Amino acid sequence: MNKNKQYVVSEQDIVNGWLSGNTFDTVIMDDTKPINIYNEWCQTFDLDKFIDAKTENTTDTYVEDCLRKWNMPDEYMNINIQEWLMERCTNAQQRDRVYTELLEYEKRGMIIVLKFLLHLVHTCEQHDIVLGVGRGSSVASYCLYLLGIHHIDSIKYELDIKEFLK
């Protein structure tokens, strides 16, 4: 692992991973030539098993790269989270609250966090993982309530979103 907390793998590491039943979408390598050859082979035989191989990132952009993708499926990266949340509102008060909160999330560059949390909740549901009732200031967010992160209706209990987004 390098200073940017990247695992740099070798060609043998990938082969060992495959033999152990693992799959790879992205790898960090000193030399990406073997993966480029593999990807050419996949393209030749029309296989959808490409690997995105990158050379070791020694700059501080590694964290930025992770935040940009968030390691979640495209369906969540591309979802219109405002539309998804508004569809779950049943009255004007709820829609106003969601709109107000979304403005605050947007100001802080946190819309992608909401998308990731939706992915997290769906993943937990698929694997029968129980999420908590609610904890701390997060229960002040009605959007998080709609996403299923917690089960406290912040409108019902008149909780101010500013308690969460301080």
Image (cartoon, grey):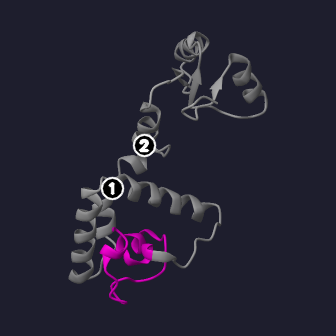
Q: Which residue appears at 34% of the width and 84% of the height?
A: 159
Q: Which residue appears at 51% of the width and 77% of the height?
A: 134
Q: Which residue appears at 22% of the width and 71% of the height?
A: 100
How packed is label 1: few (under 14 Cα within 10 Å), some, or many (20 or more)?
Answer: some
Residue labelled with disc 1? 111
* Quadrant in the rendering for residue 101: bottom left
| Mark 1: secondary structure | helix
Relative height, residue 149 to residue 14 (above, below): below
Q: Which residue appears at 48% of the width and 80% of the height?
A: 151
Residue labelled with disc 2? 67
* Quadrant in the rendering for residue 31: top right
17 displayed left or right of 54: right
Label 2 vs 1, first from the N-terminus: 2
Relative height, residue 142 to residue 104 (above, below): below
Q: CA distance from mark 2 to mark 1?
A: 12 Å
Q: Which residues are magenta?
A: 137-166
| Mark 2: secondary structure | helix
Q: Position of residue 166 (x, y in %)?
A: 33, 68
Relative height, residue 49 to residue 107 (above, below): above
Under mark 2, the amino acid is Leu
Q: Are marks 2 and 1 in contact (CB under 8 Å)?
A: no
